[in-house]
Amino acid sequence: MENLDKKYESLFTPWKIGNVEIKNRIVMCPMGGTSLFGWFELGGCHFDKEAAKLFLERANNNVGLIIPGIAPLRDTFWGKWLWQNPKMFEELKEFMDEIHKTGAKLFVQLTAGMGRSWAITELIAPLHKNKITRAIIKPIIDTSHELASPSPQPSRWAHDIICPEMTVEQIHEIIEAFAKTAKLCKDAGVDGVEVHAVHEGYLLDQFAIEFFNKRTDEYGGSFENRYRFAAEVVGAIKEECGEDFPVSLRYSVESKMKGFCEGAMPGEEYTEVGRNMEESEKAAKYLQDAGYDMLNADNGTYDSWYWAHPPMYMPENCNLEDVAHIKQFVNIPVVCAGRMDAEVGAKAVSEGKIDAVGVARQFLVDPEWVTKLIDDRIEDIKPCICCHAGCFNFSSSKGHANTQDLTDTMGLSRCALNPLTMQSKKYKVEPAKKIKNVAVIGGGIGGMEAAILLAKRGHKVTLYEKTETLGGVFVAAAAPSFKEKDRALIAWYIRELKKYPIEVKLGTEVTDIKELDADEIIIATGAKAKSVPVAGAEKAIEAIDFLLGKEVGENVTVIGGGLTGCEIAYELYLNGKKPTIVEMQDDLVTTPGICLANTSYLRDFFKANNVPVHLETSLKEVCDDGVIVKDKEGKEFKIEADNVIISVGYNPAPIAKKAKNVHIIGDAKSVGNLRTVIWGAWDTCMKI
C-alpha cells in the first residue's frame, strides 16, 4: 500500500468482531437482492451464483468484511425454510473457501421478516385483499405471513391493508429458524451472521418500537418485552453455535419518525414517535448484553426511509454523529453506514468514534473502488449518484402500493450506472467480431457510454457533440447544489473517454448522417422539452434554462411536480427563494421506478418547510405576474409569482430515423433516466 494517501491509513488497520479478525475497516453493507440464497425468484431459495460472483469480485478488490443482503429465513415463494435446503449450504461452503483465499471475511444476514414494511406490490395487493384469492395463492406466496406484524396496523405500502398480528408460535418458530440456519452457516465456514434487524422499521424493529407494538403479552409493553424477540434470537444462535460465533445486529440508532409515513428532516426539531436517543442508549447496551457482538448502525424506518437509504438530497455522513454517540454506550464494535465519505470515515475511525465504515451502493457502481483508493487513483472511482434507479427502486405514491416493475422486484441490487452488476450473464464486454468505424452523435451520458463500450470492444469510434461541452442535458440535471455526485460523474466520463482511442469532435453539429464516413451510426441526441398549450406560455422559463443559470425572482411557481419539478423547487428553497408547485396528478412524483426513499424525502421536505403544493391542479394561463390555475373542483384562481418555470417532461429528439446501420439510444429513443440511457446503450452496442 505504498501509494495509499495517509489520510486513509486508519481504514486499513485490522480489528476484531468477537474473535474474528477483519483485515481492514471497510464493510460492504447488505443490500436487498444480493442474498446468497436468492432473492425473489419463483424457483425458491437456492445458492445464488450471480450474487456469489458479485462478492468474490469485491473480495478480490480489498474489501474487509462482506455482508450479503437479507436472506429470509422462510422463502418468500413456496414457504420453505432455509435450513431445509442442505445442498445450498454445501455450495456455500465451497464459496466460502474462495472468499477466504482473498483474505476477506463474510457474515450472512438473516431476516425475521418485514412485517408492515413488506413492499407489497400493485400486482399482489389485490390478491391479498380478497379472501378467496389470498387462500388460492397461499401455497405459492403466503402474504399473511409476509405481512405479519407485532400488532394489527396498516401496511407501509398499501394503507388499506391491515397487517395481521404475529402469534407467539410464529415468533418461536422464527427464533428456532435463526438458530438452525446460523448453525448451517457456521458449518459452511461463514465467519458470522448478522441479525436483520432492530433497524429501518423491519419486523424486529416493529416489535422494539412502542409506536408499532401494542401487544399485551410477553413480547409487548415494557422495554424488556419489546426487545425480547431480538434478545431471544441472539440467545438461540449462541446456544446453537457457541459463544465464540460472532453475531452482528443491524441497528437503527433513532427512528427519525414524526408519525405514520412521516419522517423528520436533518436538523429539524420534532417529537420522536419511534426510538429516541434516550431509549437507544439503553437499547444498545441491552442488546450487547443479550449477546450481540457488533452493531451495524444507521438511522430511520420505512416512514423516514431516506435516513437508511440516503438519496442525493441527504447530507453525506448523515448518520455519523448519532452512531458515534451510541458507541459511547457499548463495548462492542460499531459500524456506521449512510453516504459515508472515505476521508470522513477514516478520520472517525482514527478518532475512535466508530470502528469501521459501512459502504453499500458504491460497491455496485465500481467493484474496484477500494483497490483504487489504495492505489491513490481516486479520480478513477466511478461515483454513486444515490439515484436508487437500479439498486432499490421500490416506488409508491398516493393510493398505490409498491409500483415497482415485477422484473425489478425480482432483480434488486442492479446498478443504473453499471449494467454488469448482478447481470453478468446479460451484459458482457466482448471483442467485436468485425472492427467497424462507428459514429456516435451526441456527447451526453448515453453517447459517452456508447463510445467507451464500443472502444473497449475494439471499434474505431468518433464522437460528435454540437456544443463545446460534453454531458448533454445531464449538465443541466447536475447543476443543482445537491448534485455534486452527478457533476463528479460527468467529470469521470470525460476522463474515461481519454483512456481510449476515441476521436471526440466538440462544436460539431451533424445535420446529415449521410455525410458521415461510418459503418454504423449511434444517435444519442437526447430529447426536447414539451411545450404547454396555454396562453402566455412563452413568458415562462423552461426547466433546463433555469438549471443552466437563468436568474429568477423571489417567488417562483413551478408547473409540474414530477421529479425534475420537485428538484427545482427544492433547489429554489435551498437558495432562499419561495417556490410553489402546481401538479395535475394527486401526488408528487407518481412515476413508477423512482425510489420511495427519494420521493418521500421531497414530500416530507416540502411539508416540513411549508412549501405550497397544489395537487390535482391544472395550468390555464401564464401571466406577467403569475399563473391562473384550476383545481379539481373546477375553481380557477391566481398564484402570484415573479417567475414561472415549466417542467412537464420531454419528447425524444433523434436527428435521424432508425435504419439497418442507424441505431437510436437513450432519450432520443425513449425518455427515461440514466439507467435506461446506460443499459440501452449496452443493449445496442453489444450487438455491433
Image (spheres, helix red, strand yellow):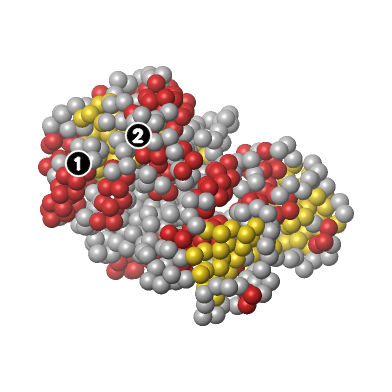
Which percent across, then down, holds residue 683?
44, 67
Who's the residue at 79% across and 41% down the image?
554
Which percent across, then down, holds residue 165?
33, 48
Which is more N-terminal, label 1 or label 2? 2
Above-or-below relation of 218 to 627: above
Residue bearing the label numbered 2:
26
Who's the residue at 29% across and 56% down the image?
50
Type of the residue with mark 2: Ile
User: Dot 1 lies on which element?
Assistant: helix
- Furthest residue in direction bottom, as rendered: 660
Kindly tell me whether residue 378 is visible in this rendering: yes
Who's the residue at 69% across and 40% down the image?
573
When asked about the image quadrant of residue 611, the answer is top right
Closest to the observer: 421 or 569?
421
Which percent across, then down, holds residue 548?
71, 49
Is 680 on the left or on the right of 614, as rendered? left
Is 38 on the left or on the right of 239, as rendered? right
Type of the residue with mark 1: Lys
Above-or-below relation of 1 to 163: above
When asked about the image quadrant of residue 427, the answer is bottom left
User: Dot 2 lies on which element?
Assistant: strand
Residue 101 got which mark? 1
Nearer the observer: mark 2 or 1; the answer is: 1
Kindly tell me whether residue 200 is visible in this rendering: no
